Amino acid sequence: MVFLARDRPHGEAATQNFRSKSMSEPPRIPKPPLFLLSKIIAFTTSSILYSGLLMLVYFVGCQGFLSTDDNSPVGVEFVEMAPRTLEEEKKGGNEPDKPPEPVEEIIPPRPAPEKPVTVVRADEDELIPSAPKLETTRIVAQGVPGTEGTGIIGDRSKGGREDGIARHGGSLAAENSVKAALRWLAAHQDRDGKWSAKEFTRHCPPGDSCGGRAPRQHSGLPGTYDVGVTGLALLAFLGHGNTHHEGEHREVVSRGIDYLLGQQDGRSGAFTRGERTSMYNQGIAALCLAEAYAMSKDPKLRMPVIRALGYIFQAQQKYGGWDYTQFKTNRNDTSVTGWQVMALKSAHAAGIDIPWQTTYGVMRHFERVTDEDGYVGYTSARTSRQGVALVAVGMLSNLYMGMGGNHPTVRRQTAIMLQDLPAWHKLRGSHGRDHSMYYWYYGTLAMYQKGGPAWDKWNNAIRDMLVRAQCTKGHRRGSWDGDGYWARAFAGRVYATALMALTLEVYYRYLPLYESKDTLGVGSALVEQLHSESNPTQKLAILRKLVLFKDPAVPGLLKELLSDDNPTVRFSAAKHLAERGEPAAIPFLEKGLSHADDFYRFNAIRSLEELDHIDTIGPLIRALNDPLEANANRAARALQRKTGVRFGLDTTKDPTERAKIVASWQTWWQNNREKLGALPDIQGSVVAARAGGTRVLIKVRQGDAVKKDMLLKVFRQGNLVGHLKILEVLLGGMAEGTVTHWELRGSSIRQGDQVATKRPAEGDTVD
């Protein structure tokens, strides 16, 4: 209790006085003054009001902080608000210079609203940027691939496009991006039909220039880039099914074709107005006219295409490539060569013959500039600049020439590109010269032709990224900024837009090679070269190259070589025929069992083992008497795998015991040859494998007569991994098997591996 100083008693008197009062009357509790009570009430009230005000300010501040857009310090954005486009995020471009930093997630104190469904309508005037997530619903397939196209050109009709998008991983958003790009290109075409790399901005309204003019001229390239840029723009319209006869943009295409024809020299076929011809312009213009001719079959285009190709033929350099110009410099430029290869490929698809010397030269160039790891040089394998863009050019050219997807070089190049997937920020900085739109275009075509998981991974990286990066505001909507060293410095916005539109047309622009089977035919060129060669060593070198290409002429040529004057050439041809399952090789392989060279006989036994034919059993029984123990043991293992019969062969035993075992095989063969008949054609795949991959569950094709104790081979990516013995046949085409022998040390059978009695065709191999 509080007392005032003047009311307080002091000393002993005060104590005595207090005691006397306490004894004479009851104690009293003094009441506090009124002003003290009022202060207590005021303090309590103000505290309550102040706390309430703080809570109100905090609540309002948090609400504003959590719902902010541009002013948010951590960049939090609710989905109910208008999504920011990449156009707004970066002035002058559409992707950040580096990958975005991770954003801390903040959970709001109220339920988050449902995300709006992104709808991208194909008939809208403006591409709607789909955020926060792209709509990737696939279009329902309606067309039949290849019904309206020629060879690899495929079907570019509406139904064919929808089918390609559905089957190869396209999306509605990507298709809308292509349509928007075509509208932008159409709006920036000159009256004479060309697209200008520098002056296209004359079509922009005042105060809304698209920007992105090509400011520089390459010192090695003559003239302007207008012919090449016009060709690329026209290719984008052609790729979407437009020709000068039909399509929404037929007038645009017609004017563009007329411009190119007007730029071509009527005698030489060169697209030039001066003495020097840019082979970039030549290749792209020839490619464009070849596709227009393949799609329309307009006879007025045939001779211009033939003349353009004739100019390309005569401009080929000594080592098979092309240089910046038509003059013979002995410089072979991989980048320039890539465009010539594409022109040759489309002309070939249109039914125009390509000289075998030209395609053979192309093969020589890429063989010369490609190193053992798959990297491709600008002008040579090791002494010139390399980069992923050139790897993409090399891989696509190799596939077009007829190398299969499982060719070792193609596989190495696929791995290189999958380690450097497209990303917009890679167009800048140290990646800028090698990681370019040019790389993305060639890489997309190459991976699409390869197919399988490699294509899926590449497509997932590039498709939605390109849609997000497309400009969506102002007069430049539908275009792409020319980012990257070449596009920004030399080619500009028209080049970038045409190239990115072509990249997003990949789903239907061409048929995959594994569907069309239409290649440039380097195999046929090698056949011609081999026929003109008399040196056995050179013949063998050509033969080793030939068998790596997918060409229908190869088996026939190998059979011809079985009667070659040189026995080594005959035996080599028989080996390669055996790899293809041709029984015509058996008599020549059997002759090889009598050769004096141990290794020669070993190769004969191995080829007989790989050849899945009943007539190989007799020669293999004969090989049990081979003087080299390793060869005899190999023949015994081959017989066991082919027949499931085991007599045992111990080469350390005396000749009498060994002769008894051989006699047992011969007796068995005489008694069972008629019963066995031809080896069945079984094909299937591994659906499950136990740890270590020694016991597996397989599923075979419907109708395949798999039986207990049957011996099958296991393949992965076209390579023989091991051998299986069927333990039990189950219902539904299923069977259980166990590994009897590994071909590769440290292997294990995996889910998805192929199982067959014969080596499967390349198109059926698991990637």
Image (cartoon, grey):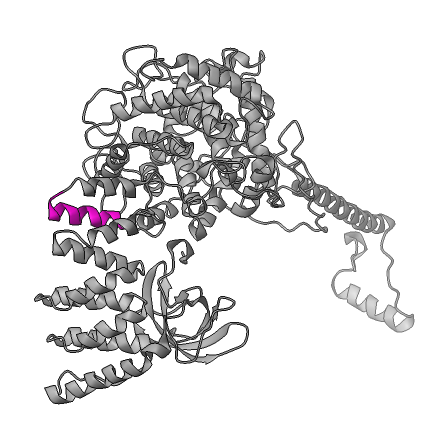
Q: Is residue 334 above or below residue 35?
A: above
In this rendering, the answer to whether 518 lies above or below 191 is below
- x%, y% of residue 143? 59, 42
Which residue is at the front of the view, 193 or 9? 193
Quadrant holding the N terminus? bottom right
Q: Is residue 542 magenta?
A: yes
Q: Residue at x 22, y 67 (%)?
A: 606
Q: Position of residue 432 (x, y in %)?
A: 36, 33
- Looking at the image, how many numbered discs can be counted on the residues? 0
Apparent side of residue 142 relative to residue 447 in the rendered image (left or right):
right
Asked where in the image residue 586 lies, by quadrant, the reply is: bottom left
Residue range in magenta is 534-547
Viewer can see residue 71: no
Name the residue nearer the viewer: 24 or 362.
362
Quick one: 754 or 57, which is closer to the camera? Answer: 754
Residue 137 in the image, given as x and y percentages of width and height: 62, 45
**Farthest residue in the right direction?**
25
Question: In the image, is 548 to the left or to the right of 565?
Answer: right
Which of the pair 167/594 is nearer the observer?
Answer: 594
| Residue found at the very far left of the displayed protein | 596
Q: Residue at x 23, y 30 (%)?
A: 332
Q: Residue at x 54, y 76 (%)?
A: 731
Q: Is residue 374 above or below residue 244?
A: below
Q: Is residue 722 visible?
A: yes
| Left or right of residue 118, residue 73 in this image | left
Q: Kindly report the secondary structure that dominates the magenta region of the rendered protein.
A: helix
Q: Left or right of 403: which side holds 505?
A: right
Q: Position of residue 519 (x, y in %)?
A: 37, 41
